[in-house]
Image (cartoon, grey):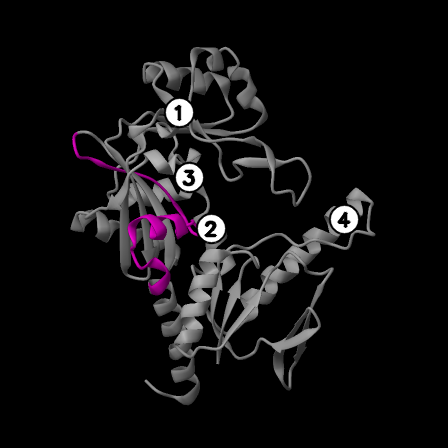
Amino acid sequence: MSILLLTAPDDTAADRVEIELRRRGARVARFDDKPFPDRASISLHCSSASGMRHNVRADDVPAALDDVRAGWDRRPRTSTVAAHITDPLLRAHLEREANFFLDDVWETLACTWLPARRSAIRRAEHKASQLQVAVALGLDIPPTLITNDPRELLDFYCEHGGEIVSKSFMYPSVAAEPGETSNFWVARTEPVSRRDITHAQGVRDCPVIFQAYVPKRVELRVTIVGQRLFATEIHSQDTNRTRYDWRRYDLAHTVHREHELPDEIAARLLAFMAQFGLCYGAADLIVTPDGRYVFLEVNPNGQYGWVENMTGMPIGSAIADQLMAFDEAGVAALVGVP
């Protein structure tokens, strides 16, 4: 039996988990979606007599996928076709086909996935669905408007005295060319100014998330692995750079420390994860000056490496524990162990 890691070759957080898994005696395979189909090949054989067989060849090294019992869909990347295909329409078509095929491949493996199967991850990435579930579970959320109607935006702005912020849905950055790592435009959480409101008509072109601004004592990144929660205080208000969005990162001036979550908040977050079928996620919350916990979102593939580095919390070890448990459960099922 083996554990499959889907991530880029330069993913240092995954490196640490892979080393830990191998130290524990696990068989580990690693695959990066990006070189497919240009520098990697996958073949599926399916028949009534023998069912499904999977083979993958990357860097001319063949590997069977049929014995994979645990998978970590860590940092999936989009497929890239060969450079000699220069027609943009053809490239776009082939890359869509390749990505759709890879999604299908990983869905067909007889294994348990962290954070979940890609179909479940896609559902969990929808922001409005997250907020709906959070409210149903009793989590406090900011008053929120998601719209492409300028009139609705103006009403919301007035309703909250101009104290609102804007957020993107899914893609906070745009690269100059597909695959580039340097972005020329990045959207973070931003206050909506009076000047912005004079251009409210712009939302007609694309829906935007608007939320009432929530005063912050600290922000929380809660990394959830199975039933374990690692809550970290991010003192984002200590520096102007991170006041509205700690993802602008001013780590030298931003205190990170462990945080003890109230039992009821922890239970609701675990219920949220169960609702979406996730066994890993990075939840973002605000703790207000008067002690309220306000839920913002859960990223099913959120980063955790910098939190582990700054706090020493054993998140990577917990991920290894979870993957080993999946692998051992798969072995037990195959040999009939209850």
Say whether residue 208 is magenta. no
| Dot placed on the residue nearer the N-terminal end, 3 or 4 | 4
In which quadrant is the C terminus drawn? bottom left
| Marks 1 and 2, how far apart at CA | 24 Å
The residue pinned by badge 1 equals 165
Q: Earlier in the sequence, mark 3 or mark 2?
A: 2
Residue topped by disc 4? 91
x%, y% of residue 133? 34, 45
Q: Are marks 3 and 2 in contact (CB under 8 Å)?
A: no
Q: Secondary structure at mark 2?
A: helix
Q: If you read the primary sequence from the N terminus, does the residue marked by circle 1 or circle 4 appear first?
A: 4
Q: Nearer the viewer, residue 307 or 186?
A: 307
The residues tagged by marks 1 and 4 sit, at their Cα atoms, a distance apart of 37 Å
Q: In the rendered structure, which segment of residues is drawn in magenta? A: 290-317
Q: Mark 2 belongs to which amino acid?
A: Arg
Q: Residue at x 26, y 42 (%)?
A: 139
Q: Secondary structure at mark 3?
A: helix
Q: CA distance from mark 3 to mark 2?
A: 10 Å
Name the disc covering residue 123, or none: 2
Which is more N-terminal, label 2 or label 1?
2
Which one is earlier in the sequence, the residue at label 1 or at label 3? Answer: 3
